[in-house]
Image (spheres, helix red, strand yellow):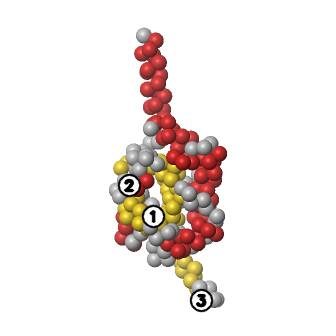
């Protein structure tokens, strides 16, 4: 009888973990290209790893730098806890016309990102459009400003998003990228690691 009680407690504990990760949605595969001009298939190429995915464009003046910095803070926190090797970070640009691999590489260099387990990717406009639609991420080009030096400054109105995918490539949770609670996502990552 005591064994049955402990088994029930254990199962209840597992159920509690699932409540923190309300989604379990299978994601289609998308052919992308990373900052090194290498083709990657997302999420297929990253299965067995937990994925932290941020949606950005490099010309963004506000939300995207915050999202990128928060992903960096998550990466640093996971390094401190020695579980960074279980996680892959991915920044996906929704501005494929401008954010070519060389631009993504420069973006990473300027921010001193640790690319040991972080890739920055983009894809064809049609691929990115389908990917954004599946993730329910809105990105609409907004005002364009022409600066005195003939440089064009443009903006997107877009969803503020970091998404968490499990080791099977399934979407498990979405967070506000610019205001994410680092403790919340690291706890969720540990739950996925322990549930494996």
Figure check: 190 above or below 116: above
Q: For the residue labelled by badge 1, is the local secondary structure a helix, a strand or a loop?
A: loop
Q: Closer to us: mark 1 or mark 2?
A: 2
Q: Give the farthest residue toward the top.
A: 1
Mark yes or no: residue 63 visible: no
Q: Residues within 10 Å of mark 3 (few under 14, many from 20)?
A: few
Say whether residue 79 is left or right of residue 124.
Answer: right
Q: In the rendering, at what x and y percent does residue 2 appear?
A: 46, 12
Q: Residue at image x 59%, y 70%?
A: 107
Q: Is residue 44 left or right of residue 143?
A: left
Residue 57 spot, x, y in % from top left: 53, 69
Placement of the N terminus among the 4 image quadrants: top left
**Position of 86 relative to 136 (above/below):** above
Nearer mark to the viewer, of 3 and 1: 3
Name the disc covering residue 150, or none. Answer: 3
Residue 8 visible (yes or no): yes
Per the image, the residue denoted by label 2 is: 44
| Pointer 1 or 2: first along the chain | 2
The local secondary structure at tag 2 comes to helix
Dividing the picture into quadrants, the one containing residue 5 is: top left
**From mark 1 to mark 2, how far is it between C-alphas?**
23 Å
Q: Is residue 24 above or below residue 15?
A: below
> In the rendering, which numbered label is found on residue 138?
1
């Amino acid at each position: 009888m005591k064994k049955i009680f402990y088994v029930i407690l254990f199962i209840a504990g597992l159920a509690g973990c699932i409540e923190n990760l309300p989604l379990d949605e299978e994601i289609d595969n998308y052919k992308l290209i990373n900052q090194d001009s290498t083709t990657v298939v997302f999420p297929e190429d990253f299965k067995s790893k937990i994925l932290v995915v941020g949606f950005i464009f490099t010309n963004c003046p506000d939300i995207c730098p915050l999202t990128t910095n928060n992903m960096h803070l998550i990466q640093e926190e996971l390094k401190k806890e020695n579980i960074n090797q279980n996680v892959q970070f991915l920044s996906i640009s929704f501005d494929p016309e401008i954010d070519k691999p060389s631009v993504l590489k420069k973006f990473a260099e300027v921010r001193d990102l640790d690319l040991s387990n972080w890739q920055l990717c983009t894809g064809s406009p049609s691929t990115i459009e389908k990917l954004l639609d599946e993730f329910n991420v809105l990105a609409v080009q907004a005002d364009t400003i022409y600066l005195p030096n003939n440089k064009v400054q443009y903006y997107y109105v877009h969803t503020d998003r970091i998404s968490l995918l499990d080791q099977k490539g399934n979407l498990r949770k979405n967070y506000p990228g610019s205001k994410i609670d680092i403790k919340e996502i690291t706890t969720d990552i540990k739950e996925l690691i322990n549930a494996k």
